[in-house]
Amino acid sequence: MKKSHVRLVARMAALALILSFSSWSQSEQNAVPGEYVVQMSQPEFKVRGFEVIEAIHADLFLVRDTLARSSGAAIARLKEEHGVQIAEPNLIYRTSAVPNDPDYSALWGLKNKGDADSAGQQGLSGVDVGAERAWDLSTGSRSVLVAVIDTGVDFSHPDLAPQAWTNDRELNGKPGVDDDGNGLVDDINGYNFANSKGDSTDDNGHGSHCAGTIGAKGNDGKGLVGVNWDVRIMAVKFLDKSGSGTLANAVKSIDYARTMGANIMSNSWGGGSYSAVLENAIKESSKAGILFTAAAGNDANDNDARASYPATYNVENIISVAAIDNRGQLANFSNYGAKTVHVAAPGVNIVSTVPGGYASYSGTSMATPHVTGVAALMLARNPSLTFADIKSILMKQSRPLYTLHGRVASGGVADAYYAMSGDTPPSDPNDPTTLSKVFAYQLATAHPYKENTKIEETIRVPGATKMAIRFSRFDTELAYDAVSFYTSDGTYLGSISGKQTGLVTSPLIHGDTVILKFASDESLNSYGFDVDGVLYE
Ligand code: CA
C-alpha cells in the first residue's frame, strides 16, 4: 500500500494550517452548541424549552436551548412556532490569515519595485495597488471613517494611534456610563462585542494588521505607511483572542458600524454556512450606503461553485477580494470566482502593524484591507462617490493581470491610481498569451506521474526575446506537486500546481531560455502535464 491513513491525516492537518483559518476542518466547531439566532415577526420571543440570552434587535434574539436537543431538532422546533421567521445556529466565523516570519523592509503591496518579499520571493515590478502614484492625487482624509470588523485594533501602536475614530460623547463622558445612549457603555473607539465591553483593543494581532494596511499613519517619519496616510478607523471587535467569533456578535458589529456612521466596513473573516440573519444585516448596511469589503476566503476554492460567506452573499455593496503574490500570481490558498469574486489585491507576505510591532501575514484577509484602503482613498478625494460608484470604478479601473483572467470578475488587481485618475489601465506587460509564434516542443510526465518524480529541463528558443511554455494538459496535486520556472541564472519566475483549465502557460520569460523543474512528493499523484509548445516572439 502506498500510503497510510496516518500520513493522510498528517497532510490534511498541515493543509489546514497553511491554507485556511476561514473554513472548517472537521475538528473545529462551526456553531456555539445550544445557541440559536431567531428572527421574529414581533418584538417578543417566547418558545417553551428556549431562553433568551439577549435581544440583538427588538425582533432578533440570541436564544439557548434548555433541553439539549440536536441542532436540527431545535431548529425544527423553533420553525414550527408562530412568529419565527428565521432560526439559525449561532455560527462561528474566523479570521482569514496566516502568520509567518516578519520582515520590516518590503511593503510590496503598495509599491513593488521587484525586490524580494519577506519570504525572499523576488517580486515583479508594478504588481501592487498603485499607491505611490495615487498619493499625488490623495493621501487620504480624516473625513473617511472605516470600520475594521475584526479582532480589535491596538490604538496604542504609534502607527495607529493617530487614526483612531473617537465617539466624543463617550470620550468626554463618564466612565461606566452610556453617555450617548446607544446601549453600549464606554464605546470610545468602537466596541468589543467578543467580550461585551467598551475596550476594543486587539488581543490577537489580525485586526491591527488589517488596520495598518488600510491606514498606518504616513509621513510621520516612523514605522510603516498604509494605503491611506490619514483616515479614521473604528475598531469593532467580535473575533476573540483566538480569532473566532459568533454570528450574533457579527450582526451586532455590522449594526454598530452602520448606526455609528462608518463609510466602509472591512471584513477579513468568514466561514460557516449561509445565514439569512447575516445577509440581512449586510443588506441594511447596503441600504445605508456603506461599502462592505470581504475576504474571498483561503480554501483555494471556486466561490462560483461553492459559496464562501460573507463574501459571496448577493448584496450589491459587497466587494469580494482574492489574494495575489508579489509576482501577480493568484495565491495558492486564495479563493476565486469569475462571477462572485470581484477583484484581487496583494495578500502574500504582507508586512503591517501588530500590537508591539510589525509582522508579515498572508491571506485574503490581507488583500481585503488593501481594497478597503483604495476605496477610502477614492472617497477622500471625492466624497460624493456612492458605494456603487466605488465598486464599479474599482473593477473597471483595476489593472489587468493575465493570471486573473477568468478568476475574478474584473480580471485585475485593485489600483488606487487608475481608480482616481481615470486614466486607462495598461494591459498586462507580462501576458504570455499575447506571444504570437509557436516553437514546437514536447515534454510530458508519466500519466499519472510517479511519486518523487524530479524533472529538470532547460528549454531554449533561438532568437526569442520573450517566451512562455504552453501546456495542453495540466493536473497535479495543489501546492505539493508543482512545476516551477527559473531563468538561466536561477532566478525564480513562478510556479503552477493543481488542476488547470483553459490556456495554461508558464509566466512570460524575457530572453531565449527557461528552466522548468517538476517535483512530486510521495503521495497523491494526478495526471501530470503535457507541454505542446513554446510561445515566443
Ligand atoms: Ca455608548
Image (cartoon, rainbow, N blue to C red):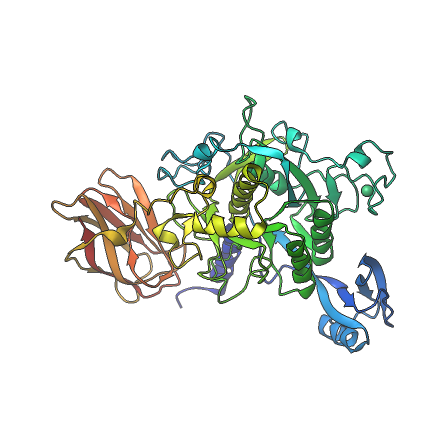
Q: In the current view of this chain or complex, which residue is farthest to the top?
A: 221
442 horizontally vs 37: left or right: left
Q: Where on the picture, by quarter, is residue 246?
A: bottom right
258 horizontally vs 515: left or right: right
Q: In the current view of this chain or complex, which residue is farthest to the front?
A: 384
Residue 331 in view here? no
96 horizontally vs 402: left or right: right
Query: For the point 65% across and 41% down, which residue is it?
Result: 204
Position in image of residue 191 (x %, y %): 75, 43
Of the pair 312 and 301, the residue shown nearer to us: 312
Position in image of residue 162 (x %, y %): 65, 29
Of the pair 39 and 335, the residue shown nearer to us: 39
Dividing the image into four equal quarters, which quarter contains ligand 1? Answer: top right
Position in image of residue 519 (x %, y %): 32, 53
Query: For the point 12% across and 44% down, which residue is it?
Result: 463
Q: In the current view of this chain or complex, which residue is farthest to the left?
A: 462
Position in image of residue 136 (x %, y %): 46, 30
Quadrant for the N terminus in the image: bottom left
Q: Where on the picture, by quarter, is residue 211?
A: top right
Count of numbered circles in the view: 0
Residue 360 in view here? yes
Query: For the point 19% across and 42% down, which residue is it?
Result: 511
Is 12 rendered above or below residue 102?
Answer: below
Is 388 rendered above or below residue 473?
Answer: above
